[in-house]
Image (cartoon, rainbow, N blue to C red):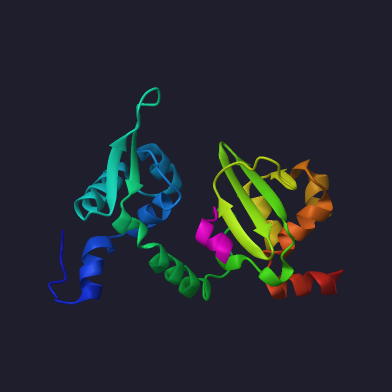
């Protein structure tokens, strides 16, 4: 691995986590233990050889560790060490900085948890539990309480609103390219629990203020 060869804490940190994909692997492991296949699916575009090399480097640096779950699972998983967990405020700061110029998502983009928090608008928050099923086992749940958001990639036990749709349909709603009523009528969104009112509230919590204003003017 190439080194910067500088006696500098920034250069040293980049020696450890500065390779392409390394921080995104850390980002995924912030969600908990992951199998190799889980990481590969969460990072489309990374080759298996690159993922193997990055995991090995992160293990050597003491940021990631590999462990085998006990029976009956018996599978090998990767998880962050305490030093790896200590990178969370670094990722949060990077997310806040990057969100300033992130712009709108492409139709096929899947949102990371950091993007969810970056786009969340507390001033429009409506308390509730929201579950989004993207299909193929990809589920995201969000809990809003007293204007604060917590989110994760798991199913919600008793959601206020549960919907099934693909990422492009969600993006169209968030960017106000279509309306909730039109999306439901067209079958692009299936409401499993809750109502169109709750879905409109969910959209409002993540729509850009200018997008919301444009939709109000159009109405």
Where does residue 155 sit, x and y in percent of width and height? 61, 41
Q: How many marks?
A: 0
Given residues 45 and 204, the one toward you in this image is: 204
Q: Is residue 115 left or right of residue 48?
A: right
Magenta stretch? 109-117
**Name of the residue lying farthest toward the right:** 219
Q: Is residue 189 left or right of residue 46?
A: right
- Residue 189 as seen in the image, left or right of residue 150: right
Q: Note whether 91 is above or below 57 in the view shown.
A: below
For this rendering, which residue is in front, 68 or 17? 68
Location of the N terminus (image quadrant): bottom left
The reply to whether the magenta stretch includes residue 111 is yes
Asked whether residue 133 appears in the rendered view, the answer is: yes
Location of the C terminus (image quadrant): bottom right
Q: Position of residue 8 (x, y in %)?
A: 19, 77
Name which quarter of the figure residue 123 lies in.
bottom right
Q: Give the residue displayed 22% in from the left and 74% down from the top.
A: 9
Residue 161 spot, x, y in % from top left: 74, 47
The residue shown at (51%, 61%) is 114
- What residue is at 28 percent from the left and 54 percent from the top? 63
């Amino acid at each position: 691995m190439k080194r910067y060869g500088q006696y500098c804490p920034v250069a040293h940190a980049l020696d450890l986590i500065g390779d392409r994909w390394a921080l995104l692997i850390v980002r995924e492991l912030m969600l908990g233990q992951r199998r190799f296949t889980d990481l590969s699916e969460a990072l489309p575009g990374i080759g298996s050889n690159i993922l193997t090399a990055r995991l090995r480097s992160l293990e050597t640096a003491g940021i990631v560790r590999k462990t085998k779950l006990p029976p009956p699972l018996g599978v090998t998983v990767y998880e962050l060490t305490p030093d790896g967990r200590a990178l969370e405020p670094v990722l949060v700061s990077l997310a806040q900085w990057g969100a300033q110029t992130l712009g709108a998502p492409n139709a096929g983009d899947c949102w990371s948890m950091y993007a969810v928090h970056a786009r969340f608008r507390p001033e429009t928050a409506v308390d509730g539990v929201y579950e989004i099923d993207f299909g193929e086992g990809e589920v995201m749940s969000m809990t809003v309480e007293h204007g604060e958001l917590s989110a994760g990639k798991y199913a919600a036990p008793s959601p206020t609103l549960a919907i099934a749709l693909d990422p492009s349909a969600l993006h169209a709603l968030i960017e106000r390219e279509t309306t909730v009523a039109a999306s439901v009528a067209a079958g692009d969104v299936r409401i499993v629990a809750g109502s169109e009112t709750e879905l409109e509230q969910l959209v409002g919590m993540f729509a850009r203020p200018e997008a919301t204003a444009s939709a109000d003017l159009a109405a």
